[in-house]
């Protein structure tokens, strides 16, 4: 019984953190749309920077798995 209570608490905490993540992603998308409309050149520069950082992180993660 005690173990199931702990599992329920962990599940509840996980669900709330997932909901918070979706909420923050939604706010980020709305903010990005607003900024893109008003300051197009700056927002495209920022999005390009984030995209390049994301791509380079993926390349670094794949390269670290190779053993010499």
Image (tube, rainbow, N blue to C red):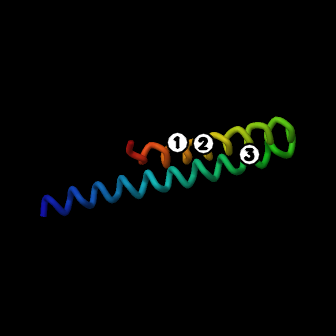
- Identify the residue position indicated by label 3 in the image: 32
Name the element at disc 3.
helix
Residue at the spot 42% in from the left edge and 47% down from the top edge? 66
Residue occupying the point 86% across, 46% down: 37
Q: Dot 2: what SS?
A: helix
Instruction: Tell me, for residue 56, which label it has, or none.
Output: 2
In the displayed structure, 65 sits above or below 45; it is: below
According to the image, label 1 marks what residue? 60
Residue at point 49%, 55% (across, down): 19
Name the one closer to the observer, 57 or 12.
Answer: 57
Residue 23, percent from left and from top: 57, 52
Tell which residue pokes out farthest to the left in this image.
Answer: 1
Where's residue 33, x and y in %?
Answer: 77, 49
Q: Is residue 2 left or right of residue 43?
A: left
Label 2 vs label 3, nearer the camera: 2
Q: Contact (CB < 8 A) between labels 2 and 1?
A: yes
Q: Position of residue 39 (x, y in %)?
A: 85, 38
Q: What's the distance in space between the residues labelled 2 and 3, CA to CA? A: 22 Å
Name of the residue lying farthest toward the top? 42
């Amino acid at each position: 019984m005690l173990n199931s209570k702990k599992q329920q608490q962990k599940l509840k905490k996980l669900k709330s953190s997932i909901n918070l993540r979706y909420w923050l992603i939604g706010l980020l998308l709305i903010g990005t749309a607003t900024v893109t409309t008003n300051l197009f050149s700056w927002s495209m520069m920022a999005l390009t920077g984030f995209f390049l950082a994301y791509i380079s992180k993926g390349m670094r993660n794949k390269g670290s798995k190779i053993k010499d």
